[in-house]
Amino acid sequence: MKRGRWWMAVPPALFIGWFFLYPVGELLRLSLTQPWSGRLPGGVILFTLGQALASTVLTLLVALPLTAVLSNFDFPGRSAVRAVVTVPFVMPTMVVAAAFLSLGLPASIWTILLAHAFYNLAVVVRTVGTTWSRLDRLPYDSARVLGAGRFTAFRSITLPMLKPSLLAAAAIVFLFSFTSFGVVLVLGGLKYRTIEVEIYRLAVTFLDLPAAGALAIAQLLGVGLVMAVYARAQRGAPTQLVPEMSRLRRPGRRTGLVWAVVGVTLALEVTPLVALVRRSFQGNGAGWRFLAEAGTTAVTPAQAITNSLRFASITVVTALLLGGLAAWVIAGSGRRWSRYLDLTLMLPLGTSAVTVGLGFLVALDRPVDLRTSWLIVPIAHSLIAIPFVVRVTVPALRSIRAELMEAAAVLGASPRRAWRVVELPLVARSLAVGGGFAAAVSLGEFGASTFIARPATMTIPTLLFRLLGRPGSASYSGAMAMAVILMVVTAAVMLLADRGRVGEMGAF
Amino acid sequence: MLECRQLTKRFGRRSALDRLDLTVATGEILAVLGPSGSGKSTLLRSIAGLEDLDAGSVWWDGEDVTTKPVHQRGFGLMFQSYALFPHMTVGENVGFGLRMQGAEDVAERVREALAWVGMAGFADRTVEGLSGGEQQRVALARSLAPRPLMVMLDEPLGALDRMLRRRLLRETEEILRATSTTTIYVTHDHEEAGALADRIAVLREGRIIQTGTLEELAARPADPWVAEFVQDDH
């Protein structure tokens, strides 16, 4: 039975074409046809690659011990630990940046690397952990029985089976660090500049759009290369996986080791966020008072919060609608063009947010000038949020056995009704999670918003950044309080989405 | 009465159904007996309307229903894997077809159908906690509750152990007889077919090669293959 009709691909395809492919194309045309003064800044490119590589190595070093523990042992609180280490990953970059500022670390490369490791840890724990915790112990045990030592057996049996997921995790961490913007901008002072920061500087400070465009295209090529590595890693032969329960063991005499690893990692993941909350209350809550009073900024903090919530709501609706349509098409047909649609929709996720924002500025004045409309902000957010909706919904749809829909049809349900009472409820959980991600993306989005948000449409992260750049300890404390608000709202949204069970089935 | 005329269904170059003719009288229990890969499931799916035929037609009581959409045919089909809806309770599963018909006495008829299969009191359970045998009963109740014109059972006992099969086979027959439901029962087990059905149709490579009672098939097999297929193991 077929799922998804071809016309459902049209709205998402139009959206991605108008708001991503066309602007990026314009950017390319601009950088190729307009004269621009500078040369490609070699130092910046080298620094970007170097710090991304270092961030990846550091993240793996910090994350793998915990991943090993979570993938081999069952202990009370295991799932809670997994949930807690995921929290930093969904935190907006401005929250992460503010949290590391509040630790009082100096503006140095190490602070940047630590911040990258802090929020990318979950990528490794989740990506590698889902495979590792479900690896069959049998091959490893056979090797041991055949005379291999613990280390040899791990290296020759376990490691090769983990390689695809390790590569995939490393590629994602590298990509995130490669295009890192907010964290580097805030924690690097003016000393350290990634390509992303340089694009921003060229475009906003020097108004050299062609040069910024050229750099953005160069970065896009780098991203494409990394994504190719990722795609290859994903293709690795699927290993036979077993249920977690049959792999995990009680820690036994390794209890001490297990808790030491868990303790150290949790401390690393929780300390910055706790420091942020404490910092926001310093000076008798000067930061919070600042937020309540501030009349010195273009928008009041309350307005920025209202803006953020409004944009997030629109993003959720748009991303669910367009991402949902795309997911049904992608899950339903094995046709080539649906795979291309899938890949194209993923592009904004890999593209830096700054490039998206820059592209909007360059291209979106025709046919209607969207650049002056507040709608441009939720449009940019949706572009980045749609891939999340697609990625969680497609597997959920594919896991619905065709027979369920056939059974519904045989029992007298028309295709539309079967969709409504069987298919939709079965993916409702995933849609809710996708919606939660969309909200979190929108609430925390910084790179594109700095380009396109006008004074009146500033969001929490953009106002936060503005406050950080202003002299005076009051506005600095205000920024910290703002970061706490953003942290709490984001956490609440994710929690809500995870619980979200859409109604009970009963009313058909 | 169901009539299948010259049903043909090809997958690539392989014919799953090859100009197949079959008739089932109203109230009759017909077993379709054949080895795996003989086209049994494709036959049921084609009658239900889940497969587009390459040629041939399906008739019910003199009406050509070949182009009628699945959900309007009014036939029941019980899948080998049961295909229970995981997000619904046992009662909601059993009542599904009734709700699709817009029936008014859904709750009462769900209770009745669950009573047929000995699962009274299970209505509010989730389907996840059910054993294999219980799932089979719920699937049977779900197929029968809307009172379909005819019900088709696709190896309904295939996934169960021997003891359970024997018991459920007897119960299934009792229910089908009590509700006088026209039935096509697909199996690869000639003992099962013989114990339950009025008539057995032997299917091989997409064609019905012989029809009769188990005794007739054993006494006068159409060819050596049928003779061996319906032979007792002991």
Image: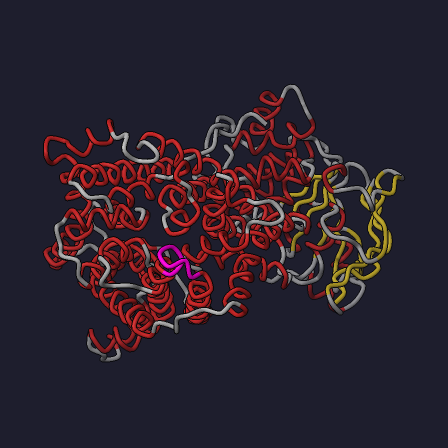
Q: Is residue A74 magenta?
A: no
Quadrant holding the N terminus of chain B: top right
Figure disc tally: 0
Q: Nearer the viewer, residue A388 or A66?
A: A388
Q: From the viewer's perspective, tell me whether residue A473 is left or right of residue B38.
A: left
Give percent across and percent down for residue A383.
49, 50
Q: Can residue A236 be spotted in the picture?
A: no
Tell me which colouring the rendered structure shows: secondary structure
Segment colored magenta? A202-208
Q: Nearer the viewer, residue A486 or A505?
A: A486
Give percent across and percent down for residue A276.
18, 43
Q: Nearer the viewer, residue A216 or A508?
A: A216
Q: Is residue B109 above or below residue A281?
A: above
Q: Quadrant of residue A158?
A: bottom left
Q: Is residue A207 magenta?
A: yes
Give the residue drawn at x 24%, y 27%: A293
Q: Is residue A335 above or below residue A290?
A: below
Q: Can residue A157 be spotted in the picture?
A: yes
Give percent across and percent down for residue B230.
69, 60
Give the residue drawn at x 47%, y 39%: A316
Q: Is residue A471 above or below residue A116?
A: above
Q: From the viewer's perspective, tell me whether residue B66 is left or right of residue B168.
A: right
Give percent across and percent down for residue A240.
41, 65
Quadrant holding the C terminus of chain B: bottom right
> For the view shown, which residue lies furthest in the bottom direction?
A147
Q: Nearer the viewer, residue A379 or A504?
A: A379
